Image (cartoon, helix red, strand yellow):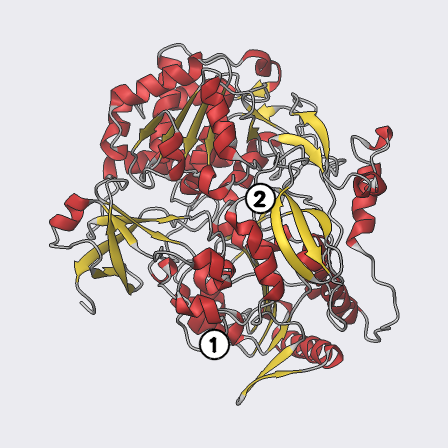
Amino acid sequence: MSAASNVHYRTCNLCEAMCGLEITYRDREVLSIAGDKNDPFSRGHICPKAVALKDIYTDPNRLKRPVRRTETGWEEISWEEAFTEVVTRLRQVQAQHGTDAVGVYAGNPSIHNLGTTIAAPGFIKALQTRHMFSASSADQFPHHFAAWQMFGHPMLMPVPDIDHTDYWLILGGNPIASNGSIMTAPDVANRLRAIQQRGGKVVVVDPRHTETARKADEHVFIRPGTDAFLLMAMVHVLFADELVNVGRLAAFTDGVETVQALVATDFSPEQAEVLTGIPAQTIRRLTHAFAAAPKAACYGRVGVSTQAFGGLALWLVNAINVLTGKLDSPGGMMFTTPAVDFLAGAKPYNRYGRWKSRVRGLPEFMGELPVSTLSDEILTPGPGQIRAMVTSCGNPVLSTPNGRKLDDAFASLDFMVSIDIYINETTRHAHIILPTATGLETAHYDTTFHFLAIRNTAKFSEPLFEKDTGAKYDWEIFEELRLRLEHAEFDATTPLPRPEQKIDLGLRYGPYGKTGLSLRTLIDNPHGIDLGPLQPRLPDRLLTADKRLNLAPELIIADISRLKEALTARLTNAMPLQLIGRRHLRDNNSWMHNSERLVKGPNRCTLQMHPQDAASRSIVAGQTVTVRSRVGAVEVPVELTTDMMPGVVSMPHGYGHGRKGVKLAIASQHAGVSINDLTDEQEIDALTGTAAFNGVWVEVLAGENV
């Protein structure tokens, strides 16, 4: 008689949405994965990525023991041997070349794993290096920068209260494909539909007619990289047409008059039209509609963040919400009350420009340097040159600008260690790979995404399966590395602190602790606990030194001169087209391409192009073309679609699995090409150091090897 099946409830940690899962299993076999209808936040919704948790767990390419790269291939080694070699080699590099000779890169999945979130910072601190890099400077630094300058801390980022809004203005975001980003929101499609059913409106501004735009009430094309001009023009209209109404925010907001003076004579809708391609009358109409809506939220995401004026654009998004009284108001942009509040007791923040990158002089922010200059720091000789790297949960060869240059840089290192479960385009350069127990084998609590959720909830997921004998959790790896670095004599019997202990303390001393919320409470409620809708939090939540909202921060206002120069210089280039990325619901990160069920179907690694741009180049649908930028060229098939704004082309993120030495059997069969073999590491937002992926100038030529 076969064993009976059982049911396990947990949160999917593959993206930001925190969807609840109902997993039916028998012994150590997953039988099915469905949405948890009793999860108060996701309400039974899941996306196709959720089933990949089973695929990752059973993936024959997933590493489960440490491996060492040799001249004849990879060999499995013991944990003791791996830890000893890693710590010895890192110490040797630092002893010979200084502490900054070791660099660290943390990838996006770091924040999706509780153990890494809790334990990695201690290990990084033990390295004592200033060469810290992460995916944040390739994605979201402008959000953090604007939050720090205006509200006092980089993590005080407001999120759209979409369950109660009447007007949702989305710039450069595609939440139906992403499930939200810096906005944790499962089941966006139904939530968007609910806005419309209650008489509200959704407007999308994007160079591509995205999946979200198809469901919206209105879509407006905009030229890539010009969002700051649109937003400045909207602020101009707010003042010129007397639409400013700060409301209750006026009691603790400074800088309204400064902003008014900035737009009094410049940044008119007519000036913005020339750069953005959006008619002046449309800019005025959108501004009036937003200001008139009783409840409205202006939300900008990755397309706005990853451009030359990303920092200014995200400041302007916040400013528009402030000037119309939509910030900290139900149905507008609001702040969460998370059960584990890691900002409780936080002091005014000052982690910017404390040091600069050695080669390009780019300022540090949040303890990190811009990842766009990582290859420079490795390849440029001299004191402080990076000679060893630690990478964790990341694949920067495919996810950071000019990946080929970084590929060459990693190949030149004296030593490299990767904490990862795969031999991918980046980790193939490692001398040692330390794999972690993953997904279904781990406990989970989303410390960051509960902080950015559109509703206050709390949920803890216990492991479904025990990790394999001899395997290690991510927190065990980081803690042991930290202890070995800090102490000449390491005692292997020393108990390591478990992440769950910190979560329990955070819950007990958090805003709901007095009502009895604890880890035990969440374990007893495996579907999660609803803590209610977002509530106004200002001014108490502000972390500025004077507890006031700063609408005109000096660093940001100083950067407007750069924007004024671009008003007259125009955004032009010798190359005729602008390249943008795109995201698919089943892609998310490059490592998900090793799941057959996620990559099956038509080839998604295509160059989307408007038919008139193709016709002028004698290009037909399905043809393989050469796309060339300043840094390189790739060959990719063309997909013709009127979803693209004329003059703009698009490629997806995360492909390029054809590199030698990659051990990803399924991904290699769907290799595609990397968009980041075209993006330019020299193009950044000068204010925040963020990679300017959006709007890379390219030419598209008919034929291969052109």
Is 485 on the left-hand or right-hand side of 146?
right
* Circle nearer the viewer, 2 or 1: 2
Q: From the top left corner, tell me how far across and down residue 269 is, in percent.
A: 28, 23
Q: Who's the residue at 46% across and 72% down the image?
A: 409
Instruction: Tell me where residue 240 appears, x and y as whole percent.
Output: 35, 13
Give residue 70's quadrant in the image: bottom right
Is residue 355 something that shows in the picture? no
Give the x, y percent position of residue 96. Answer: 63, 78
Residue underneath mark 1: 411
What amino acid type should be assigned to the residue bearing mark 2?
Answer: Glu
Q: Mark 1: give few (<14), some (14-19) or many (20+) Cα within 10 Å.
A: some
Q: Nearer the viewer, residue 400 or 31?
A: 31
- Count residues near mark 2 (Cα–Cα under 10 Å), then give few for <14, some for 14-19, many for 20+: many
| Nearest to the observer: residue 663 or residue 30 | 30
Question: Which mark sits nearer the N-terminus, 2 or 1?
Answer: 2
The picture places residue 672, in percent across and down from the top left corner, at 36, 63
- Confirm whether residue 646 shows in the render: yes
Residue 157 appears left or right of 590: right
Q: Quadrant of residue 566?
A: top left
Q: Residue at x 45, y 18 (%)?
A: 200
The disc placed on residue 16 is 2
Element under disc 1: helix
In the picture provided, is 570 more to the left or to the right than 556?
left
Q: Mark 2 to mark 1: distance in Å? A: 32 Å
Does the CB distance between marks 2 and 1 fall below 8 Å? no
Seen in the picture, residue 165 relative to 210 is either above or below; the reply is above
Callout 2: helix, strand or loop? loop
Furthest toward the bottom, the residue is: 72
